[in-house]
Amino acid sequence: MFGLFGKKEKIEPIAFDPEKEEPVVKKSICTGEATVGFVERTTGKYRDVRKVTSPLEIAAFCKQVGVEEGKIRTIY
């Protein structure tokens, strides 16, 4: 995958337990700011990984966690 500056970057996987956590995109309804992270399936608690500013960054996160791009859930 190409990074923000046109250089090829290696995508490192992010380890998580899919039985306990779900990868999500979290967006602010006020500002539109978006972050990616994980939601605990039992408690609903959100764990932030990083801020994202473009669809390319969301796509990179999806690859890191092994989720199809259009299949990741967005929460508010």
Image (cartoon, grey):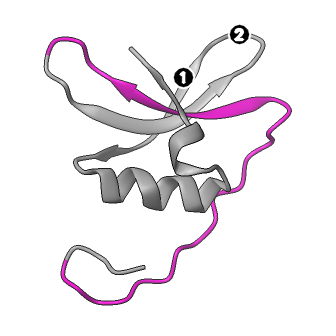
In magenta stretch: residue 28: yes
Query: Which amino acid lies under the numbered mark 1 shown in the image of this protein?
Result: Tyr
**Quadrant assignment for the C terminus:** top left
Cα separation, mark 1 vs mark 2, equals 9 Å
Picture residue at 72% right of the left edge, 31% below the top: 21
Quick one: which residue is furthest to the front in this view? 70
Magenta range: 5-30
Picture residue at 50% right of the left edge, 83% below the top: 10
In the rendered structure, find residue 43 and report the number of the disc placed on it: 2
**Quadrant assignment for the N terminus:** bottom left
Name the foreground residue: 6 vs 15: 6
Helix, strand or loop under label 1: strand
- Image location (x, y in percent) of residue 9: 41, 83
Q: Which residue is mark 1?
A: 46
Quick one: which residue is furthest to the left in this view? 31
Picture residue at 69% right of the left edge, 22% below the top: 40
- Image location (x, y in percent) of residue 62: 54, 53
Picture residue at 52% right of the left edge, 49% below the top: 69
Query: Which amino acid lies under the numbered mark 2 shown in the image of this protein?
Result: Thr
Name the foreground residue: 13 vs 8: 8
Above or below, 10 relative to 44:
below
Main secondary structure of the magenta stretch = loop
Helix, strand or loop under label 2: loop
Could you tell me how many numbered marks the image carries?
Answer: 2
Asked whether, in this view, residue 67 is left or right of residue 32, the answer is right
Asked whether, in this view, residue 72 is left or right of residue 55, the answer is right
Asked whether, in this view, residue 21 is left or right of residue 61, the answer is right
- Image location (x, y in percent) of residue 16: 73, 47
Q: Quadrant of residue 60?
A: bottom left
